[in-house]
Image (cartoon, rainbow, N blue to C red):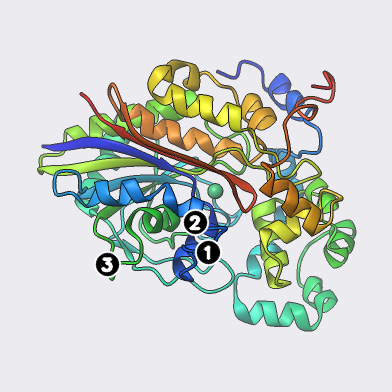
């Protein structure tokens, strides 16, 4: 069905406020995402919470990924190859729900984000395509 | 012979599991979420509908597998699968029991049919598999059905196309129908519907698109097979792509007839969809 890999991936970049987890991002984010996976173990969560910087020293994450992790800058982490299901291990360890963590990426307060969801969610109108503005 | 009697699709939002595990079904937020499963809970109990085995299509959410191994299509052939610890302890739900002879038979048949499956004997199963069971069966001591898990990668792109998923479903049908034991089989598709969990566009919901998708499961399956990834991404949010797993279910059915439908927004960040389809071979 996909005839042209270049066009296939080019189109992904045309979606506003969205990062599709492509092979490039998977390559870039490998150690970052595997670090996130390590937080599935309670003993690792304890160690991470006790001293985040020291814990990260044991992982081959880049300086940029490290800074973004310490700052819990999830949009930046997505850009640096983090995937949301992996990053979820970080915000769950912080005691945040998906709704709470996801709202931080939208520039909205948690309450405003929740109110938007209760009212039916974000409309796709205007956020389908950057080029078309639809 | 084994026969597929029905298809069931449902979102597998973790919050549904929270609602069941913590007994919140009667709270105002949860009431409309669970109301739409009441019909199915009654239907699935009836002796003439109760499945012996569910072939359950789901995806792992960085629970059993990290980035170390990323199978595109996989099948669970081990005897049983424990609920995964997704970071806050495993869900208090029964161990999932497989029908390993059927699973191995399906694996063999699919590979001969040119679907090069990864065979998994050991894995823990996350909310993608256990939440649909809780939605349909509540909190039993043991799950009232055996489960053959089919796993699809819908996280790391490129993921399989909708059409490829549909054809996997057709191959599953051929596999099941060539298994000699008399079994009532259901095929379940899980995940979706519209939702986006990442980036500034998070929270996207497209009820109109979702409803049309539900309509066309019976009205125009061919259209659904031709939907490209980019349309799911634009119209239903980055995580709406999970709906390709519904097409595996659809491929395993013949002339499906809609018996029941449920749609509700929101379940946390997600548009919840659920449908029951009768198989009419
Ligand atoms: Fe999912």
What residue is rendered at 69% in x and 52% in y?
A84
Chain for numbered disc 3: B
Q: How far from the left and from the top, in percent, is residue B81?
A: 36, 63
Give the secondary structure at mark 3.
loop
- Count neighbours of disc 2 (C-alpha within 10 A) and say few if under 14, some if 14 to 19, many if 20 or more: few
What residue is rendered at 73% in x and 22% in y?
A6
Which quadrant holds the N terminus of chain A? top right
Separation of marks 2 and 1 at Cα, in angstroms: 6 Å
Instruction: State whether residue A31 is above or below residue B163.
Output: below
Give the secondary structure at mark 1.
loop
Q: Which residue is mark 1?
A: B27
Q: Which residue is mark 2?
A: B31
Instruction: State whether residue B5 is above or below residue A108.
Output: above
In the image, which is nearer the foreground, mark 3 or mark 1? 1
What residue is rendered at 51% in x and 69% in y?
B85
Q: Which of the two residues, B91 or B174, is positioned nearer the viewer here? A: B91
Separation of marks 3 and 2 at Cα, in angstroms: 25 Å
Give the secondary structure at mark 2.
helix
Separation of marks 3 and 1 at Cα, in angstroms: 26 Å
Q: How far from the left and from the top, in percent, is residue B39?
A: 33, 46
Residue A28 disc label = none
What residue is rendered at 22% in x and 36% in y?
B5
Chain for numbered disc 1: B
- Count neighbours of disc 1 (C-alpha within 10 A) and say few if under 14, some if 14 to 19, many if 20 or more: few
Chain for numbered disc 2: B
Which quadrant holds the C terminus of chain A? top right
Q: Which residue is mark 3?
A: B142
Q: Which of the two residues, B148 or A132, is positioned nearer the viewer here? A: A132
Q: Decide if residue B134 is on the left or right side of residue A24.
A: left
- Count neighbours of disc 3 (C-alpha within 10 A) and say few if under 14, some if 14 to 19, many if 20 or more: few
């Amino acid at each position: 069905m996909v005839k042209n890999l270049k066009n296939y991936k080019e189109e992904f970049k045309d979606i506003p406020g969205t990062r599709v987890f492509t092979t490039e991002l998977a390559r870039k984010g490998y150690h970052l995402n595997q670090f996130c996976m390590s937080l599935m173990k309670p003993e690792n969560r304890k160690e991470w919470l006790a001293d985040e910087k020291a814990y990260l020293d044991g992982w081959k994450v880049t300086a940029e990924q490290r800074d973004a992790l310490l700052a819990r800058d999830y949009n930046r982490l997505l850009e640096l190859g983090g995937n949301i299901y992996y990053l979820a291990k970080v915000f769950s360890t912080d005691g945040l729900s998906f709704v709470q963590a996801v709202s931080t990426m939208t520039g909205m307060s948690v309450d405003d984000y929740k109110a938007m969801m209760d009212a039916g969610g974000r409309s796709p109108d205007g956020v389908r395509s950057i080029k078309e503005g639809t | 012979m084994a026969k597929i009697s029905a298809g069931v699709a449902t979102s597998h939002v973790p919050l549904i599991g929270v609602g069941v595990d913590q007994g919140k079904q009667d709270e105002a937020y949860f009431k409309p979420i669970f109301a739409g499963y009441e019909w199915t809970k009654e239907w699935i109990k009836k002796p003439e509908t109760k499945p012996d085995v569910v072939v359950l299509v789901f995806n792992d959410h960085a629970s059993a597998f990290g980035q170390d191994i990323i199978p595109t299509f996989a099948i669970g052939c081990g005897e049983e699968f424990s609920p995964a610890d997704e970071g806050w302890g495993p869900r208090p739900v029964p161990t999932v029991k497989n029908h390993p002879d059927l699973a191995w038979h399906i694996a063999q048949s699919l590979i001969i049919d040119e679907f090069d499956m990864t065979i998994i004997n050991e894995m823990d199963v996350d909310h993608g598999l256990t939440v649909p069971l809780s939605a349909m069966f509540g909190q039993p001591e043991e799950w009232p059905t055996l489960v053959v898990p089919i796993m699809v990668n819908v996280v790391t792109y490129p993921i399989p196309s909708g059409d490829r998923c549909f054809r996997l479903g057709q191959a599953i049908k051929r596999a099941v129908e060539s298994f000699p034991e008399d079994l009532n089989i259901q095929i379940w598709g899980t995940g979706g519907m519209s939702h986006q969990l990442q980036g500034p566009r998070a929270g996207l919901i497209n009820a109109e698109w979702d409803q049309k998708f539900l309509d066309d499961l019976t009205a125009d399956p061919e259209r659904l097979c031709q939907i490209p990834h980019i349309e799911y991404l634009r119209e239903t949010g980055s995580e709406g792509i999970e709906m390709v797993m519904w097409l595996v279910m659809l491929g395993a059915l013949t002339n499906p007839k809609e018996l029941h439908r449920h749609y509700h927004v929101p379940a946390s960040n997600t548009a919840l969809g659920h449908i029951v389809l009768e198989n009419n071979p």
